[in-house]
Image (cartoon, rainbow, N blue to C red):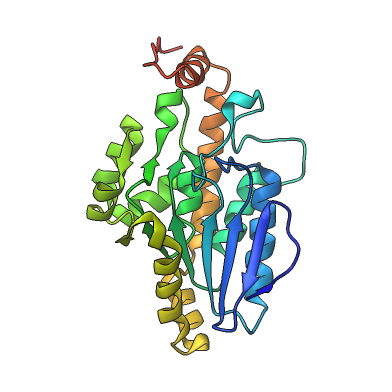
Amino acid sequence: MAKFGNYKLLGVDLGDDHVATVEMQNGDLNFFDLEMLTSLADCFHDLDKEPKCRVLVLASSGRAFCAGANFASGTRAEGLSTSKPSTSGSPLYDQAVRMFASKKPIVGAVNGAAIGGGLGLCLVPDFRVACPEARLACNFTQLGFHPGFGLTYTLPALIGQQKAWNMMYTGRRVKAEEALQMGLVDRLVPAGKLRAAAHEMALEIASAGPLAVMAVRETMRMGLPEKVRAATARELQEQNKLQGTEDMKEGIKATAERRPAKFVGR
C-alpha cells in the first residue's frame, strides 16, 4: 500500500489491488467537525479522479466509528448555520452533500458506535460491515434535538419508514445483531476480522469493470445529493428552532451525566 494525499484527521492508503483505505483519525471517539468532514469530502473527490482507485473502505482508528458531534465541548450543535458562505445554510452539511455526491463505491467498516451525525456519516458508504461491538443510534430526540446529516431521507430509504421512525422517535441504540436483521448493516464479523472483511467486499467490487460499476452506481443513486441537500435544509431549520431550548439543554446534560432526561416541553 502507498500513502495517498495529505489530509487533516485522515490516513489514506491506496493499494495495488485498486482499494483505498480511508481511516478517520480524530481521537478515540472520532467526533466529527467541519475540518474532518471537509477532509473526507476532499479525499473522496480526489480518489474519484484517481484511476488506480476503484473502491474505498471507510474505517476508524478509534473505538467508535464516529460518535457524532461533541455536544459536551460547549460548541454549537452539529449542522447549525454559521457566518461562513454556504449553499445549504450549513458549511458542515455542504460537506455531507459533497460526500454523497462521490462517484466510487464505498464500504464502511463499523468498528464501534455510530451515533447521531455519526450514523449519518455511516450511511454515506454503499455497504456497511460491522462487528458485534457496533452500536448505531439516531439519538437526537434523546438530546431534545432534531436529526440531521440527511438522516430523515437516508435512514428510511435504507431500512424502511417504520423502522426509521422507531429509531428517530425513540433515539434508542440498535445493537449489531438487530442492525443486521433490519438491513442497517450488511455483514457482521468479529472485531479482529472487520478490516479484512470490509476489504474483501471492496475487492469483490473492484474485480468488476470499473466504468460499468461507476455507471451503475450513478444510476442507482441518481438525485441522491439533491435529496440529501433538501433534507439537510429542512433538518437545519428545525435544529435552529430547537437550539437553546430547555429540553435540549437538559438532554445534553442528562447524556453527559448518563441519566434519563427530564424533558419539560420548552
Would you say 169 lies left or right of 152 here?
Answer: left
Residue 17: x and y in percent read 54, 83
The N terminus lies in quadrant = bottom right
Q: Which of 247/71 is in front?
A: 71
Would you say 170 lies left or right of 21 here?
Answer: left
User: Is residue 87 visible in the rendered structure shown here?
Assistant: no
Residue at screen point 52% across, 87% down: 211
Indicate the quadrant where residue 139 lies: top left
Residue 220: x and y in percent read 41, 72
Residue 170: x and y in percent read 31, 30
Q: Which of 257/121 is in front?
A: 257
Residue at screen point 47% across, 87% down: 212
Residue 89 vs 96, above or below: the answer is above
Indicate the quadrant where residue 163 lies: top left
Residue at screen point 51% across, 12% down: 246
Residue 264 vs 171, above or below: the answer is above
